[in-house]
Amino acid sequence: MDMPNIMPLETDKGCLCRTCLISSIRQKIEKMASQPIRQQLKLAKQYAHPSSFIEGLDYDMEEGFMVMTRWAHLKRGKCCGNHCRHCPYTAR
């Protein structure tokens, strides 16, 4: 499964294994939260493919359940109305 290409790949900045790459991308996504929502949606839309659901980026496993991340909600492009914990569309 391909990782979203949302940041430059710096080969001299440490490990590029799947786990470390997911961690780096997730940090970038979390920093992106301060940007206007339209800018976040524009970036996420490029990766809104149903087959590209990646554990650690799109969801976390908690007590046997898939918990959607902010990135997954951005890729969806709109609020689902379920009051999700990581929903970027509602002010908490």
Image (tube, rainbow, N blue to C red):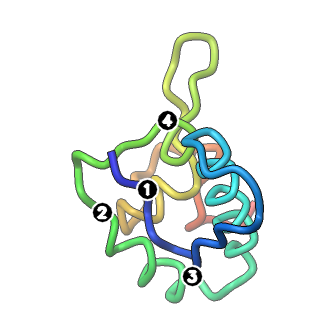
Q: Quadrant of the C terminus?
A: bottom right
Q: Name the residue beneath numbered marker 4.
A: 55
For marks 3 and 2 on the same chain, the one whose residue lies earlier in the sequence: 3
Residue drawn 45% across and 70% down? 5
Q: For label 2, count other residues whose C-alpha is less than 10 Å away and answer few (under 14), some (14-19) or many (20+).
A: some
Asked if residue 63 is positioned above or below residue 44 in the image, the reply reads above
- Amino acid type at circle 3 is Ile
Q: Which mark is residue 48?
A: 2
Q: Which mark is residue 35?
A: none
| In-front residue for pair 13/58 | 13
SS state under label 4: loop
SS state under label 2: loop
Q: For label 4, count other residues whose C-alpha is less than 10 Å away and answer few (under 14), some (14-19) or many (20+).
A: some
Mark 2 to mark 1 CA distance (whole Å)? 12 Å
Q: Name the residue beneath numbered marker 3.
A: 37
Asked if residue 78 is positioned above or below residue 73 in the image, the reply reads below
Mark 4 to mark 2 CA distance (whole Å)? 15 Å
Task: Select label 1 or label 4 by which is in front.
Answer: 1
Residue drawn 42% across and 84% down? 42
Task: Select label 3 or label 4 by which is in front.
Answer: 4
Asked if residue 24 is positioned above or below residue 45 in the image, the reply reads above
